[in-house]
Amino acid sequence: MNAVSKKEAAALELVPAANAASAPTPGPLPTSLAANFMLTLQERGAGLEQIEKMMDLLERNERHEAEKAYNEALAAFKAKNIRIVKRKLVDFPSKGGRTSYKHAELDDVVQAVGPELSDHGFAWSWKTHQAGRDITVVCTLRHRLGHAESVQLTAQPDETGGKNAIQAIISTTTYLQRHTLKQITGVAEAGEDDDGQGGAVAPLTELAQGWVDYIKSVRGTDQFDKGCREGRAALWDDRAGLIAFNAATRSAS
């Protein structure tokens, strides 16, 4: 058989498989860009070390592009300025007379953010862990290109209102699912208040003021969405600080 010249070999690579009637039927080709790239390097006689270096470079570039796509899609989602309506009324007697406030339920949050998240290529999931009395919920938001980010919150069973043990766990789990989904997407309930604390205004702590100043300083940058999530997580136990921070994120959006 005559040897095939380099020019002929290059030309053959451009011939569609459908035109090569005498060629044997090839097996299934790798579908990912990385797998195709590795196959090409092997066909060109690249050494193992060179292949590993090039694959590492390609994978890092894919991760970077996936993260970039995630941030761009999340920014587009936030541009919708979604607000969650608080429909659930909570009213009970307290030391000061009565405590009454409204909040959104988990279903309200899901219905508000779900369609837009899907339209922007996102899916979310929750994982729940329990250690002793501590219940931890992790909410993960994943973009269609593969990049994902997570937030988590921990609380103990909600035993108020005469709940049994299972109801107490479910109540806390649902509460944490609701708030982690709000955190990871950066949305807020319309007219979000202090969960029945009577609207009392407390001086901001140094930590809270620092986060408020920071989120205003990163307005319009790619650090804003990450700052929203981290700030809410850092101020979760500081109700006055969290309220001020949420107000700052809305004014900065």
Image (cartoon, rainbow, N blue to C red):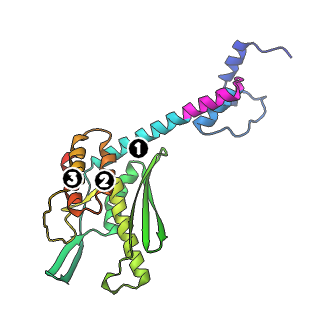
Q: Residue at x 63, y 33 (%)?
A: 36
Q: Residue at x 17, y 78 (%)?
A: 99
Circle nearer the viewer, 1 or 3: 3
Residue 48, image x, y percentages? 70, 29
Does dot 2 land on a helix, a strand or a loop?
loop
Query: Tag 3 or tag 1, which sits nearer the N-term?
Result: 1
The answer to the question of whether label 3 and label 2 lie on touching residues, with beta carbons closer than 8 A, is: no
Does dot 3 land on a helix, a strand or a loop?
helix
Circle nearer the viewer, 3 or 2: 3
Question: Does 70 appear above or below 94?
Answer: above
How many angstroms separate mark 1 from mark 3 (CA)?
Answer: 32 Å
Residue 33, image x, y percentages? 58, 35
Q: Which mark is residue 206?
A: 3
What's the amino acid at mark 1? Tyr
Q: Badge 1, how many Cα within 10 Å: few under 14, some, many 20+? A: many
What's the amino acid at mark 3? Glu
How many angstroms separate mark 3 from mark 2 (CA)?
Answer: 23 Å
Question: Relative to 113, is 198 on the left or the right?
Answer: left
**Closest to the observer, 20 or 26:** 26
Residue underneath mark 2: 186
Looking at the rendering, the stretch of residues picked out in magenta corresponds to 43-58
Residue 12, image x, y percentages? 70, 20
Question: Relative to 248, is 165 on the left or the right?
Answer: right
How many angstroms separate mark 2 from mark 1 (CA)?
Answer: 14 Å
Residue 242, image x, y percentages? 24, 58
Residue underneath mark 1: 70
